[in-house]
Image (spheres, rainbow, N blue to C red):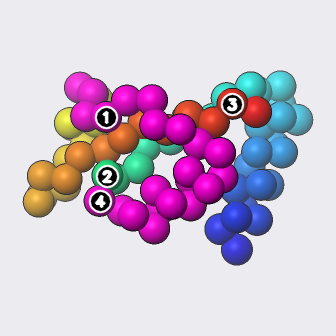
């Protein structure tokens, strides 16, 4: 189901003329990380200033992922 949703989002962005998709993922969320890497996303940045604003209570950080369409 998640892969189908990702594919539908990719297609929608393409139809709208987009070339890239960006998203943030919690570093410790290995299921989401695996899903996005398997879907063609690459890590662009970890723990930037914006990401630090959204840290969870246990201090886990975020990574910015990008996929070029």
Helix, strand or loop under label 2: loop
- The region drawn magenta spans 28-49
**Which residue in the structure is indicated by mark 4?**
28
Residue bearing the label numbered 3: 68
Horizontal side of 31 relative to 47 (left or right) equals right
Mark 2 → mark 3, Cα distance in angstroms: 21 Å
Give the residue displayed 31% in from the left and 44% down from the top: 62
**Marks 3/1: CA distance?**
18 Å
The residue under label 2 is 27
Lower sequence index among marks 2 and 3: 2
Give the answer, above or below, for where 41 lies relative to 8. Answer: above
Judge the density around disc 3: few (<14), some (14-19), many (≥20) Cα neighbours within 10 Å.
Answer: few
Residue 27, given in percent of the width and then of the height, sits at 31, 52
Name of the residue lying farthest toward the left: 58
**Label pair 4/2, CB-CB below 8 angstroms:** yes
Q: Tags 1 and 2 in contact by the CB under 8 Å rule?
A: yes
| Pick the front one: 19 or 35 | 35
N-term-proximal mark, 4 vs 3: 4
Residue 46: numbered disc: 1
Of mark 1 and mark 2, the one earlier in the sequence is 2
> Which numbered disc, 4 or 1, marks the residue that appears first in the sequence?
4
């Amino acid at each position: 189901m998640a892969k189908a949703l990702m594919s539908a989002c990719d297609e929608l962005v393409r139809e709208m003329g987009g070339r890239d998709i960006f998203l943030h993922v919690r570093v410790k969320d290995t299921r989401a990380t695996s899903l996005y890497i398997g879907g063609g996303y690459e890590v662009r940045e970890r723990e930037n200033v914006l990401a630090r604003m959204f840290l969870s209570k246990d201090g886990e950080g975020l990574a910015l992922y990008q996929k070029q369409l």
